[in-house]
Image (cartoon, rainbow, N blue to C red):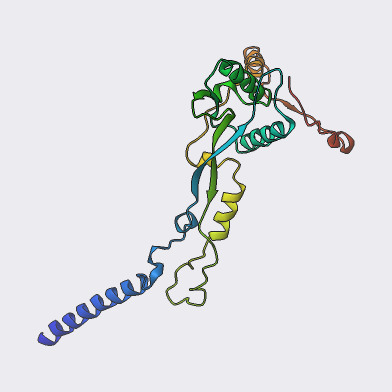
């Protein structure tokens, strides 16, 4: 009986030792303790803001911009639109009798480039600089530098390497159209009222509401025709 009790104690100790041993094998034993199988956690994409501005000489609306300043304006607005064009863009003009006329000129010029009027902000300043200033906030996405292969040859811990997923995260940060989307979703665009009325009309008449797919030959397919939209 005493032997049986001693054997049970031995087995109990052995079982506890086995559990502890298994736990020590699963637990991280090096500086990779914070790494996971999720690349987004290992190499998070960071979105940073930077202010973009340009100052342009301007005398009167009827004179417009000098060629050099017009080219700088084009490049600035082009970069704004390429960055997404969904952030406000501001026009700041010197205080004076021509301030309102100057704001109107630049506001109309921005609108002619496709900038929504609702995103154009205006202001006045009294710093003594006679130039007109345009500003907007740009967003850039990036992640940490890749190339940490310090644990590449160490597989004993059975954990991911420090560089795991870094290249993928870099590619995502480089390819994203508008990094601002990572901070907040865009507002929904306006619906197509004409198309909505057509679909509702078909539905009320018991007709097919979706576009009809056409069977096209190779020559027609090259033209880009793929469906009939009522």
Image quarter of the N terminus: bottom left
Q: Quadrant of residue 193?
A: top right
In this rendering, the count of numbered labels is 0
Q: Is residue 6 placed above or below 207 in the rendered structure?
A: below
Q: Quadrant of residue 26?
A: bottom left
Residue extending furthest bottom?
3
Q: Is residue 2 placed above or below 23 in the rendered structure?
A: below
Residue extending furthest left?
2
What residue lies at 62% left-to-right and 12% top-to-bottom?
204
Tell me if 9 is positioned left or right of 203 in this view: left
Tell me if 173 is positioned left or right of 207 in this view: left
List x then y, in percent, for residue 108: 64, 20
Q: Nearer the viewer, residue 113 or 229?
A: 113
List x then y, in percent, for residue 43: 48, 57
List x then y, in percent, for residue 188: 54, 27
Residue extending furthest right?
219
Q: Is residue 56 placed above or below 32 in the rendered structure?
A: above
Q: Quadrant of residue 35?
A: bottom left
Q: Is residue 148 placed above or below 182 in the rendered structure?
A: below
Tell me if 183 is positioned left or right of 78 in this view: left
């Amino acid at each position: 009986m005493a032997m049986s009790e001693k054997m049970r104690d031995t087995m109990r100790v052995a079982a506890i030792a086995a559990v502890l041993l298994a736990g020590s094998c699963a637990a991280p034993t090096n500086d990779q303790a914070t790494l996971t199988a999720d690349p987004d956690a290992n190499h998070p994409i960071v979105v940073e803001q930077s202010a973009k501005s340009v100052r342009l000489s301007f005398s009167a609306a009827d004179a417009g911009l000098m060629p050099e300043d017009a080219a700088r304006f084009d490049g600035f607005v082009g970069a704004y639109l390429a960055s997404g064009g969904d952030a406000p863009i501001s026009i700041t003009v010197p205080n004076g009798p021509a301030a309102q006329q100057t704001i109107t000129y630049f506001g109309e010029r921005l609108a002619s480039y496709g900038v929504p009027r609702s995103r154009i902000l205006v202001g006045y300043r009294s710093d003594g600089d006679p130039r007109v200033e345009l500003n907007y906030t740009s967003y850039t996405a990036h992640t940490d530098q890749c190339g940490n292969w310090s644990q590449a040859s160490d597989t004993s811990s059975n954990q991911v390497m420090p560089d795991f997923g870094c290249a993928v995260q870099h590619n995502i940060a480089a390819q994203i159209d508008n990094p601002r989307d990572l901070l907040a979703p865009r507002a929904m665009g306006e619906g197509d009222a004409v198309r909505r009325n057509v679909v509702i009309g078909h539905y009320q008449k018991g007709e097919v509401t979706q576009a009809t797919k056409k069977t096209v030959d190779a020559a027609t397919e090259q033209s880009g025709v793929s469906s009939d939209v009522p």
